[in-house]
Amino acid sequence: MSDFLPAASLGNYLLALLLVVLLLALLAVYQRRYRQARRLTKVLGAIAFDRIDGLIIPSADIGEIQIDHLLLTSEGLLIVDIKEVSGSVFGSDKMQDWTVISDDHRFTFANPQHGLYDRIAAVRQIVRQVPVTGRVLFLDGAEFTKGVPGLVCTLDSLLKEFDEKDRPVAKVKVKAFKPHWDLIRERAETAQSGRRSRRKRL
């Protein structure tokens, strides 16, 4: 190719080719994330009668705690923490750190179940008469080759576990949880307005 193109043109050609490859790779990542986000929205919509995203409430100990998604279901309140990793995940209920291994990287992260227990405790502190549970949701791309820990799920297993076949009957159960759900919303608004007033004072 260098016989037909001057060195400067060859450099420009290779740079343009590199940019095209980079753009195609970014487009593939964007499309994958978009498909995951749509699927996540669809599954959460199928199992929840109402939901709050990015919820901030008082912690069971001190301060505040953030919850990715809180769902009102016919079984009670469901906390969903999202983990987005790609590769083989090695972890168990008792391990402090979990490891992700893929073709090009290896890293560890703290067992996400511990944080989930804190979130469950914070919600239970507000609504004591309603069942509260939680799941750590791993999106597509994570694979548990040595077994799936207790509170971990995928989108498919989350839908299978919490999908409500009889919506009219479920609505009756959900109606009983509604006052407690409204209390959670009220506490969340109080926590967020408290944060805004603290920011103003700083």
Image (tube, rainbow, N blue to C red):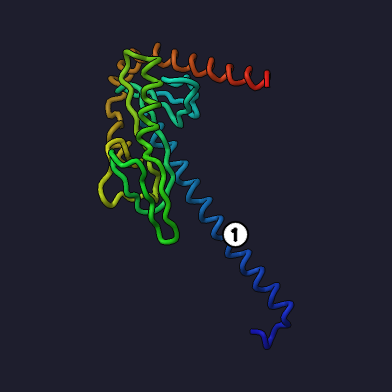
> Residue 41, relative to residue 198: is it above or below?
below
Corner quadrant of residue 75: top left
Q: Give the x, y percent position of residue 162.
A: 30, 31
> Which of the image's four quarters has the N terminus?
bottom right
Please give the name of the residue rendered at 66% of the width and 85% of the height, measured from the top-left corner.
2
Considering the numbered disc 1 on the image, is that residue within a helix, a strand or a loop?
helix
Name which residue type carries label 1: Leu
Q: Give the x, y percent position of residue 64.
A: 49, 23
Query: Of residues 70 and 67, which is closer to you in this image?
Result: 67
Residue where numbered disc 1 is placed: 23
> Which of the image's four quarters has the C terminus?
top right
- 155 left or right of 4 in image: left
- 107 left or right of 195 in image: left
Q: Give the x, y percent position of residue 14.
A: 65, 73
Corner quadrant of residue 161: top left
> Residue 172, relative to residue 67: is it above or below?
above
Please give the name of the residue rendered at 44% of the width and 60% of the height, measured from the top-left corner.
104
Please give the name of the residue rendered at 30% of the width and 40% of the height, measured from the top-left corner.
157
Please give the name of the residue rendered at 33% of the width and 50% of the height, measured from the top-left corner.
143
> Residue 88, relative to residue 121: is it above or below?
below
Give the class, few, some or many, for how many residues have Cα within 10 Å of label 1's Cα (few <14, many ≥20).
Answer: few
Q: Residue furthest bottom?
A: 3
Query: Of residues 186 and 111, which is closer to you in this image?
Result: 111
